[in-house]
Amino acid sequence: MKSAVSSSLFFHSKNLLKPNPLSRLESVCLPKPSRRSIVKLPSSSTSGLRSISSSYSSMASSFKPEQARVPSALPLPAPPLTKFNIGLCQLSVTADKSRNISHAKNAIEEAASKGAKLVLLPEIWNSPYSNDSFPVYAEEIDAGGDASPSTAMLSEVSKRLKITIIGGSIPERVGDRLYNTCCVFGSDGELKAKHRKIHLFDIDIPGKITFMESKTLTAGETPTIVDTDVGRIGIGICYDIRFQELAMIYAARGAHLLCYPGAFNMTTGPLHWELLQRARATDNQLYVATCSPARDSGAGYTAWGHSTLIGPFGEVLATTEHEEAIIIAEIDYSILEQRRTSLPLNKQRRGDLYQLVDVQRLNSK
């Protein structure tokens, strides 16, 4: 299996270091200030500046930024650790379920051997992605053991390796209902959270792709945010990433990182996959990690691939192409406060004009 370590970081850094033609123009048109051009302001002027600053603070407070989130946004919690490595396992998926489970196990072990403390798997990694396959490959997660061999493996590996696993997603059976479900296992092997895909993938792009998850799957009803050994993580699955309100709720609940196992296709993938990840990270000033299955051109549903880690400034920190790969990249939570200090969006929201209501938190009060 190919391993990719922050491969695109260097590409993007080079782009950032390219000279800006506008900066050259400014250097030609604008003379450098001399000592004589620097004028010391009298005390009355500095008092005026303080007065302007005070007036701005007063105006900003009249905008009621704290009321832009209902209930009010929670402060960003201190994470259990500042820096750690994440592993994104972009896996090939076949019709052989036992092989898929064994293959995922090997990939997790390889990622951990390379220093990953958090491992993210793809959407629907134990089954082909099709409405015909979901009922056949579905597992009773709550029953565990033989009723859910995929999650039994995740539990065993997370405990043995002492890592946190965001277990991609698998089809889950609950009575006569099926869900697209992501399980989060802590370093003790315990199931810490379970996210059922909230927004079902029902699309029809004429001449391109038609898929209706709602033919077999039921939509989840609960946003999922979980405290782990590697920070507070908000979970979404694939199509969930298109809905910025969910990401905004996670940010208001104090998430450090959003994880989206996903399987974008060959139509929407090239256009929207990276765009949406960067948008969610930039808007909410946090990390976003995604993990896709590897591309299989012979499958009924062809995944785009390109699993990625995005930083809180919208920068691509690590990515890969469409083949199988394990990406190892560093997450540094100290950057979150730096970015939020430089761009203090939370203090500049207009609660006097708009509000985002977290219905679940509001009803639990």
Image: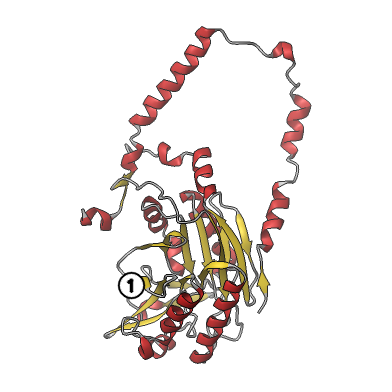
Q: Residue at x 52, y 53 (%)?
A: 82
Residue 47 vs 125, above or below: the answer is: above
Residue 173 vs 37, above or below: the answer is: below
Q: Position of residue 150 (x, y in %)?
A: 44, 84
Task: Tell me the residue that label 1 is attached to.
Answer: 219
Element type where label 1 sits in the image? loop
Classed neighbour count for the residue bearing mark 1: other residues with Cα under 10 Å, few (<14), some (14–19), many (≥20): some
Q: Position of residue 259 (x, y in %)?
A: 47, 64
Query: Does the rendering let one see residue 355?
Result: no
Q: How many marks?
A: 1
For the rendered model, the colour scheme is secondary structure
Q: Position of residue 162 (x, y in %)?
A: 48, 72
Amino acid tagged 1: Ala
Q: Residue at x 32, y 36 (%)?
A: 352
Comparing 199 with 1, the one in front is: 1
Q: Residue furthest right?
A: 28
- Please tell me in which quadrant of the rendered image residue 278 appears: bottom right
Comparing 293 with 244, the one in front is: 293
Q: Residue at x 62, y 10 (%)?
A: 40
Query: Does the rendering let one see residue 322?
Result: yes
- Please tell me in which quadrant of the rendered image residue 67 appears: top left
Q: Is residue 285 left or right of residue 112?
A: left
Q: Residue at x 32, y 71 (%)?
A: 220
Residue 350 vs 253, above or below: the answer is: above
Q: Position of residue 39 (x, y in %)?
A: 65, 11
Quadrant location, the N terminus:
bottom right
- Please tell me in which quadrant of the rendered image residue 178 appears: bottom left
